[in-house]
Image (cartoon, helix red, strand yellow):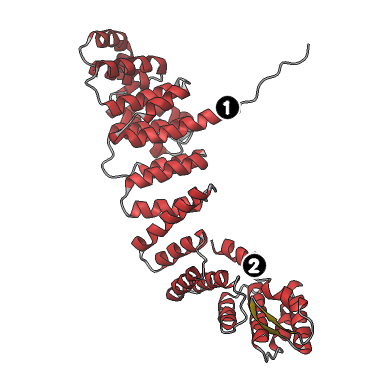
């Protein structure tokens, strides 16, 4: 962050005086309606030009010699001398020197009014860099009274409060910065999301953690990003096993299973839910990926337990589906749908989830969430989006994460190249 802001300082602020030094004629004196009287002697102007040229050439020794020899006698010459010291300090990456030079510039009456707000922000940034946080806040307040209230100033306030170990004070500024960036239509940097997520995490605001992760994934959706987001989100206290299972399914759908822990936790949740064939398939996938070994104790024991149960689970499905169709409520159909889902038989799962919803007596949030996921995995992305949008309550976060995945799949489908057959 420091490097980014420093480059902005160089590009946006530091050439203020150099152009002025070159442009003002010898011993010029003129009254300006928009600024102070400009007065420079011929000798001062020549030395200032030499210093400016040396700075542009990266010759710090010559620049330092020329600047040290400057003897300002007017307010404007004092301003130019301070500005040249500022530019030299930037060339040397001397933050303390930059801050001192800015103070000297502010002591004059020659700072252009149009530059004053931004320069005050710069002073705040430099005070932050050198560790003078109270002055940094004071300078930002001053900049705001002069009309400078950019998003960079908002984020800088957050950084300052974090350095002061005042996390609760920092969070509203990060939230404000994200809101303003969204309103501007500009992309939010990944680092801003990370800062906001860490603050929401520290505050125990899991609703915001989930919302921010989903928004981040919509922009930055690599397999690694998915794993990080879902792994961190699943640490939320009180997260039920069933929603966790669907988040592991989402992690797998993104190719984001990356460790022994991922496969082991997923398989254990599937087994706990009675999805023995799914647990078996996950262990086999982990072994194929080189993340699990046949001798790994937990999954080896689990594999031995679920293998015979998986065969019985599959064999019992046709009769269970027939029984569910004749049942008075949808609970049996929901159970059968979950079994089909766990076997990746998504069209059959869709049919049974719809039957469960039509009969009633089931958790609407869970049913709609899994209906949406099953529709998505079967390729009906538009219907999936509709079903997931209806989910409320404890399953809303699961539906939200899967909705991001659906959107990503929709974009991939929309941009698939058309195969053109060769000319005969």
Q: Which residue occupies the foreground of this view, 273 or 94? A: 94
Answer with left or right where residue 326 lies relative to residue 354.
left
Image mark for residue 126: none
Residues at discs 1 and 2 in contact (Cβ within 8 Å)? no
Q: Residue at x 75, y 87 (%)?
A: 44
| Residue 151 to residue 143: above or below | above
Q: Residue at x 50, y 51 (%)?
A: 181
- Report whether residue 101 is seen: yes
Task: Tell me residue 418's x, y (percent).
Answer: 65, 22
Quadrant position of residue 311 = top left
| Residue 86 to residue 201: above or below | below
Instruction: Give the labeled residue for mark 2.
Output: 10
Answer with left or right where residue 420 lies relative to residue 206.
right
Task: Tell me residue 404's x, y (percent).
Answer: 45, 35
| Residue 244 to residue 422: above or below | below
Q: Residue furthest left?
A: 328
| Residue 222 to residue 373: above or below | below
- Report whether residue 293 is seen: no
Image mark for residue 414: 1
Q: Residues within 10 Å of mark 1 (few under 14, many from 20)?
A: few
Sequence-wise first label, 1 or 2: 2
Task: Tell me residue 99's x, y (percent).
Answer: 56, 77
């Amino acid at each position: 962050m420091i490097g980014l802001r420093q480059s902005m300082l160089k590009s946006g602020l530091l050439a203020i005086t150099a152009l002025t030094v070159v442009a003002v004629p010898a011993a010029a004196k003129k009254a300006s309606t928009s600024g102070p009287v400009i007065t420079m002697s011929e000798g001062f102007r020549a030395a200032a030009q030499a210093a400016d040229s040396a700075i542009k050439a990266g010759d710090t020794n010559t620049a330092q010699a020329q600047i040290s020899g400057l003897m300002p006698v007017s307010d404007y010459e004092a301003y130019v001398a301070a500005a040249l010291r500022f530019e030299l300090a930037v060339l040397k990456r001397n933050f303390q020197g930059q801050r001192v030079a800015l103070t000297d510039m502010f002591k004059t009456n020659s700072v252009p009014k149009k530059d004053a707000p931004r320069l005050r922000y710069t002073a705040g940034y430099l005070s932050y860099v050198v560790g003078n946080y109270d002055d940094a806040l004071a300078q930002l307040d001053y900049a705001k009274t002069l009309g400078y209230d950019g998003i960079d100033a908002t984020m800088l306030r957050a950084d300052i409060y974090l350095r002061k170990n005042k996390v609760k004070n920092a969070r509203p500024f990060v939230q404000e910065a994200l809101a303003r960036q969204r309103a501007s239509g500009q992309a939010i940097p990944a680092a801003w999301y990370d800062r906001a997520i860490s603050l929401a995490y520290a505050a125990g605001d899991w609703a915001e953690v989930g919302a921010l992760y989903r928004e981040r994934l919509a922009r930055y959706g690599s397999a690694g990003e998915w794993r990080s987001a879902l792994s961190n989100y699943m640490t939320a206290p009180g997260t039920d096993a069933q929603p966790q299972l669907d988040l592991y399914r989402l992690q797998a759908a993104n190719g984001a299973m990356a460790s022994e822990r991922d496969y082991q936790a997923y398989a254990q949740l599937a087994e706990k839910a009675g999805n023995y064939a799914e647990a078996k398939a996950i262990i086999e996938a982990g072994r194929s990926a080189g993340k699990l070994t046949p001798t790994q104790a937990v999954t080896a024991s689990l594999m031995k337990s679920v293998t015979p149960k998986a065969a019985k689970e599959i064999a019992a499905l046709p009769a269970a589906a027939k029984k569910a169709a004749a049942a008075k409520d949808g609970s049996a159909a929901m159970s059968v749908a979950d079994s089909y889902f766990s076997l990746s038989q998504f069209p059959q799962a869709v049919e049974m989830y719809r039957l469960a919803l039509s009969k009633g007596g089931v958790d609407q949030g869970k049913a709609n969430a899994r209906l949406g996921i099953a529709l998505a995995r079967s390729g009906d992305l538009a219907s999936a989006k509709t079903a997931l949008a209806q989910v409320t309550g404890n399953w809303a976060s699961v539906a939200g994460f899967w909705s991001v995945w659906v959107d990503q799949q929709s974009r991939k489908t929309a941009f698939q190249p058309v195969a053109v057959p060769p000319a005969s």
